[in-house]
Image (spheres, rainbow, N blue to C red):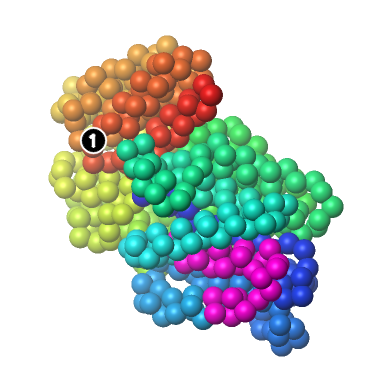
Amino acid sequence: MSRSLSFLISTFIFLSGPLYSQYDFDTNCQKAYQEILSFRFKDASFLLQQEKGQHPDNLIPVFLENYIDFFKLFTGEDKLMFETLKKNKSERLDILEKGDKESPFYTFCLAGVNLQWAFARLKFGEYTTAAFEIRRAYLLLKENEKRFPDFLPNQIGLGILHIIVGLVPEQYQWLVSLAGFEGTITEGMSELQSVLVYDGDSKMFALFKPEACFYMAFVDVNLLNNKKESLSLIHRFDVDPQLKAYSQSPLIVYAKCSIYLKNGKNDDVISLLENYHPAPGTYPFVFLYYLEGLARLNRLDPSSAALFDRFLKEFQGINYIKAGYQKLAWTYLIQGDTVMYKKVIMNAGTAGNTIVDEDKQARSEQNVEIIPALPLLKARLLYDGGYYQDALKVLLNTPLESYMRSKKDLAEYLYRLGRIYHAQGNMLKAIQYYTAAVENGRNLPHYFAASAALNLGWIYEEEGNFEGADTNFRLCASMRYDEYENSLRQKAKAGLSRLKNSQN
């Protein structure tokens, strides 16, 4: 599972709406919700306990308590904590099932608890139970939509689930239909959009905008390749008064950093994290150290080593451990220290797991036991940081014979040139080098050819050459390789879905 998809699926957040006798999203609950999104869980718990004492019949505190468990588990990935907390699910459902069945919140809250625990379970490999919980949540939300079509919160949950369904490969769609699921990426985006643009009289419904903006930004940049649109969504967080309240939320900081990185705005990532000052008592979101390390590494800054080292020491989770050691090893390699590179990269073979694509790629590098060609590595990092001209200079000004050692190096060289020219807007050269990368790398166990095909698909789609786009998206989805396979295939699937919808 890719990072971007993994995080998109698992950070499903529910907000509440108008007032009902047993579902009162009053001042205490609203403040608690804001504290939860800002990861100030102790303050949130105090407010929720206060609300329980004042209004023991209000079920919203029970619902919101589930957020705290969810965010702790998903961002911390602590297996022992998971085993300790998962008993809370059944206890909360027992309480929520005693609520008013005539309220839209009754079904909505049950769906939310099921879905949040399903996404938490995916982190820890409990796939069968998670699948049943996702199906239960989907059916509950569909029932709620039928009974209460104007209940806006449903659109967020259904939007996320429809996007997920739209990513399932065609050969497995029969399983999706058998389970009772239906939906497309386009449908899911439309549902999220309906929340984002809400301008009605309900102040409660207006509170959904941060959530919708967060998800749409991620989907745009990670699945739909709408990088500029994702930046416009991020801009909303800086100008919309309803969104600015969350400027110090670790979730929003994470979202902004990820989107800046995807858009090659490396210096913005560093600036954002340097100005991020969480309030005392904020639950640690250790992954932000990893992101800042990436940003500093992208500009070949040796200070990135301290950030990766801190991430590896403080993170108690199961993902990005191998990737963390790989990136730490790169910090030594760009300084010319091959001895330390070899020592550190060995940890990518023994520590952590291989669930997410970044960890798989790190393990692949360690397994090969060949030191990456330094010019190619520098070009990759500089490109990722948005320093396109510097990356191009590295490739064009370094004699090929000084580092070209294999078919893999040649395929990567062609691919890197394609990416750089693509980013600079030189589509003729981008197509030339992407095509060469596909030809030279399609039979290798590396991602260069598949990613080149994906980018060709995006170029042709933008140019209106839908036949060429379809051919390359299908080529990307059909290839087999060891690195980033999940994320690339998801993006190719999303491309094919867009083409299909545009022709209907």
Q: Position of residue 463 (x, y in %)?
A: 50, 15
Q: Nearer the viewer, residue 372 or 426?
A: 426
Q: Nearer the viewer, residue 108 or 297?
A: 108
Residue 404, quarter of the rendered image? top left
Q: Taking 48 as reference, is 455 above or below it?
A: above
Q: Taking 14 as reference, is 389 above or below it?
A: above
> Is 422 situated left or right of 109 in this image?
left
> Is 470 situated left or right of 345 in this image?
right
Main SS of the magenta part reads: helix
Residue 411 visible to the viewer: yes
Residue 41, quarter of the rendered image? bottom right
Q: Residue at x 46, y 31 (%)?
A: 497
Q: Taking 142 as reference, is 66 above or below it?
A: below
Magenta stretch, residue numbers:
93-119
Residue 418, quarter of the rendered image? top left
Q: Taking 195 as reference, is 54 above or below it?
A: below
Residue 221 visible to the viewer: no
Q: Position of residue 158 (x, y in %)?
A: 57, 51
Q: Residue at x 64, y 53 (%)?
A: 146
Residue that carries the numbered disc 1 in the rendered image: 480
Query: Tag 1: Cα neighbours inside 10 Å, few (<14), some, or many (≥20)?
Result: some
